Image (tube, grey):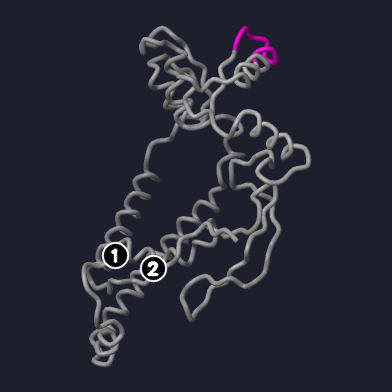
Amino acid sequence: ASMFTSAAVPPLFESGPAAAAMALGSLLAALCLIWVLLRRKKVPAMPADYHELRPSTPLLISSVAFYIFLVCRAVTLDLLDSLAEALPWRKRKAVARDPDRRGPPLKSGLQDLYERRMYGRISDTFNRPITGEAGGEVTVLARAWSRETGELELTGEEIRCLNLGSYNYLGFGGCDEICTPTVLKSVAEHGSSTSSTRAECGTMSLHVQFEKTVAAFVGKEAAITMGMGFATNATMIPTIVDAEGNGSGVLVLSDALNHSSIIEGVRASGACVVP
């Protein structure tokens, strides 16, 4: 089984009033930020379908309230621990637990507070282990919170789920009776890598054939294809707009909800943008 999670590290730092005060200060700063955002002037009108993409107001309020609760809970538990340190038997137990500890703590301050008091409670909402191939469907290993270890422990239950959390949009990541033999044949004929960039000596006959097919499909003279990524849009859009880096006088029609990589590329081009 492959685990997409990090193992918990035993805390090497006993929180005190200083860490609690830092966390409380961060909470107050967050509340001030929320207050400022609520008092801002009305934002420009968004597209008509924006309400379908934006979470509802009750959901946003409940999410923020839940994180505020987690922060308050973490600060309260650390304050109680700090008060308990004044008890004589608690001090003797702490020394006997790790008498040979040396060096600075691996984590301290807000990072230590977050990982000990908050991360363990919310990690299972976005960080779940799977087993088997990550194809169109994945097998998720169920976990449950253990009071004994203070961590999420595997229950032995396996849940079959749709894979909506990766770049494997078409389900080609796993074994497929049509795609897998074709991929193996292509690897045997062309190798698994170009070993170079397209601009140097990485262009293969497959690239040329694919670009001709794309150009014919969209009805254009030529097309450029490249591996997807943030830098693709952020660096190629300025080059396409103006190779000299001066896009003044060029008009770009850009969707208001475009990916940030497209937005960065359009900004870097220097062109005039109409959302």
Q: Label 1, secondary structure: give it.
A: loop
Q: Which residue is mark 1?
A: 106
Number of numbered discs overlaid on the protein picture: 2
**Circles 1 and 2 in contact, beta carbons < 8 Å:** yes
Does any portion of residue 257 appear in the rendered image?
A: no
Q: Residue at x 55, y 53 (%)?
A: 59
Judge the density around disc 2: few (<14), some (14-19), many (≥20) Cα neighbours within 10 Å.
few
Residue 147 is labelled as: none
Q: Indicate the amino acid at tag 2.
A: Val
Left or right? Give the position of 168 relative to 153.
right
150 up-or-down from 221: above or below: below
Q: Indicate the amino acid at tag 1.
A: Leu
Judge the density around disc 1: few (<14), some (14-19), many (≥20) Cα neighbours within 10 Å.
few
Tell me where the magenta segment starts and ends, as one range: 215-222
Residue 9 is labelled as: 2
Based on the displayed image, in which of its 4 quarters is residue 27 positioned?
A: bottom left
- Work out which residue is located at the far front of the displayed protein and give it: 188
Does any portion of residue 71 appear in the rendered image?
A: yes
Is residue 51 located in the magenta-colored stretch of the structure? no
Q: Which comes sooner in the sequence, label 1 or label 2?
A: 2
